[in-house]
């Protein structure tokens, strides 16, 4: 097991802001990216948290990530928007794209947002949460242009990314239901976290470079690469395919179809559907039915070895509360990689380390 640091939230925010300064980002971008990455850690999704910074640094240095870029409108069809992310930080581009979609959905009842060429959009649940906070329902299909990491069902090598799907449903007086998952059994970032911690992954998650089952996370992180598997066999594969066709071909005009592993960039396309429930007629009726169903489902008695039944979004909120109070765990290898990224960016790693309260 790798050593773990437990970093208090205010100190972690200060440290990550120092690293972000190395990108030459404006203050608002520094705050947006740092907040989004740390929030992923808070929700328990370390795969999409501050451990992404070394990858971002390499992408920036190769010219594939453009700091201070803004979203731009390619096509304005009223309730249909085609947007370009201009290879900007996805934490900024995603928020801007959703803000535009929210505005149109409020005026038109719904909006389709086709976003292309954004750098890594991070935890997609953040964008469903943004839409839900505006009282709107959303669905998101996302493709990934990076090193191929996931094998098609029955295939022996990687042909596409972890292609996440996400949906959010707001409920007045309750926290929203936020479903957010990679179409691979586990997110690729979780294999990086496992490798850095010196842990194995569960059986059935990946194959090695010869197409054989393996529990060694290195086969999804460093050459010779194997591949992650899709969840639910052909079902996860089918959904991953749809994410590539909708988030990639339709929204971004760009799909994963080469084996070039030389680039560090992580580009996303996202096809989002945003709906105002009130525009369909009876928001109160919708919410009453939704709440009644959720209460019915959660009343199921737990099986042996399980806690109370929960719904999507609740584990993340529980993790956020716990880590906000207790601190954010960061394994020593990931932290070392973040300090090395700080050096590449021209930031002082000693100051970053000290800001985190570490000696």
Image (cartoon, grey):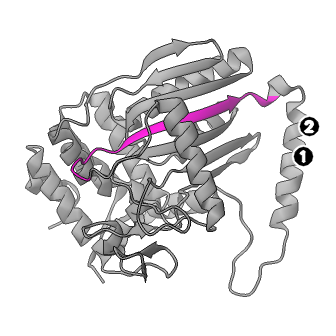
Name the quarter where the C terminus is drawn. bottom left
Residue 55 vertical placement versus 25 (above, below): below
Numbered circle sitting on residue 289: 1
Q: Note whether residue 98 is visible.
A: no
| Magenta residue span | 261-277
The image quadrant that residue 285 belongs to is: top right
Lateral position of residue 240 relative to residue 210, left or right: right
Outermost residue to the bottom = 304
Lateral position of residue 104 relative to residue 23, left or right: right
Q: Residue at x 25, y 31 (%)?
A: 66
Q: Position of residue 46 (x, y in %)?
A: 40, 61
Q: Position of residue 53 (x, y in %)?
A: 26, 50
Q: Position of residue 226 (x, y in %)?
A: 36, 70
Q: Is residue 122 magenta?
A: no
Q: Note whether residue 342 is visible.
A: yes
- How many callouts does the rendering have? 2
Name the quarter where the N terminus is drawn. bottom left
Q: CA distance from mark 2 to mark 1?
A: 6 Å
Q: Residue at x 53, y 67 (%)?
A: 185
Lateral position of residue 205 relative to residue 11, left or right: right
Give the SS element for disc 2. helix
Residue 207 vertical placement versus 161 (above, below): below
Between residues 10 and 293, which one lies in front from this camera angle? 293
The image quadrant that residue 195 belongs to is: bottom left
Q: Residue at x 44, y 50 (%)?
A: 39
Give the residue number, with chain letter if any, for mark 2: 285
Numbered circle sitting on residue 13: none
| Disc 2 + disc 1, Cβ < 8 Å | yes
């Amino acid at each position: 097991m790798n050593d773990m640091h437990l970093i208090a939230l205010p100190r972690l925010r200060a440290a990550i802001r120092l690293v972000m300064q190395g990108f030459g980002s404006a203050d608002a971008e520094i705050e947006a990216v740092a907040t989004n990455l740390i929030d992923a850690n808070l929700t328990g999704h370390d795969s999409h948290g501050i451990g992404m910074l070394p990858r971002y640094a390499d992408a920036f240095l190769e010219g594939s990530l453009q700091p201070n870029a803004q979203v731009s409108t390619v096509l304005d069809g009223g309730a249909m928007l085609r947007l370009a992310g201009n290879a900007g930080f996805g934490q900024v581009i995603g928020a801007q794209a959703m803000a535009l979609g929210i505005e149109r959905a409020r005026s038109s009842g719904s909006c389709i947002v086709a976003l292309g060429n954004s750098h890594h959009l991070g935890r997609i649940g953040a964008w469903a949460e943004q839409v839900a906070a505006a009282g709107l329902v959303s669905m998101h299909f996302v493709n990934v242009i990076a090193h191929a990491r996931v094998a098609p069902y029955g295939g022996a090598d990687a042909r596409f990314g972890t292609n996440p799907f996400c949906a959010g449903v707001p409920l007045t007086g309750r926290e929203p239901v936020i479903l957010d998952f990679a179409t691979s059994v586990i997110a690729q970032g979780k294999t990086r976290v496992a490798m850095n911690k010196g842990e194995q992954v569960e059986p059935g998650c990946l194959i090695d470079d010869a197409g054989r089952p393996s529990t060694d996370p290195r086969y999804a992180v460093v050459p010779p690469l194997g591949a992650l598997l899709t969840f639910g066999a052909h079902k996860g594969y089918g959904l991953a395919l749809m994410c590539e066709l909708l988030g990639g071909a339709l929204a971004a005009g760009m799909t994963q179809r080469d084996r070039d592993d030389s680039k560090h960039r992580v580009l996303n396309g996202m096809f989002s559907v945003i709906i105002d429930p009130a525009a369909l007629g009876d928001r109160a009726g919708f919410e009453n039915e939704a709440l009644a169903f959720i209460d019915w489902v959660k009343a199921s008695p737990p099986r042996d070895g399980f806690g109370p039944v929960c719904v999507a979004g609740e584990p993340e909120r529980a993790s956020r509360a716990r880590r906000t109070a207790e601190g954010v765990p960061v394994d020593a290898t990931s932290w070392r990689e973040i300090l090395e990224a700080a050096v590449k960016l021209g930031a002082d790693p000693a100051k970053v380390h000290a800001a985190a309260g570490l000696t």
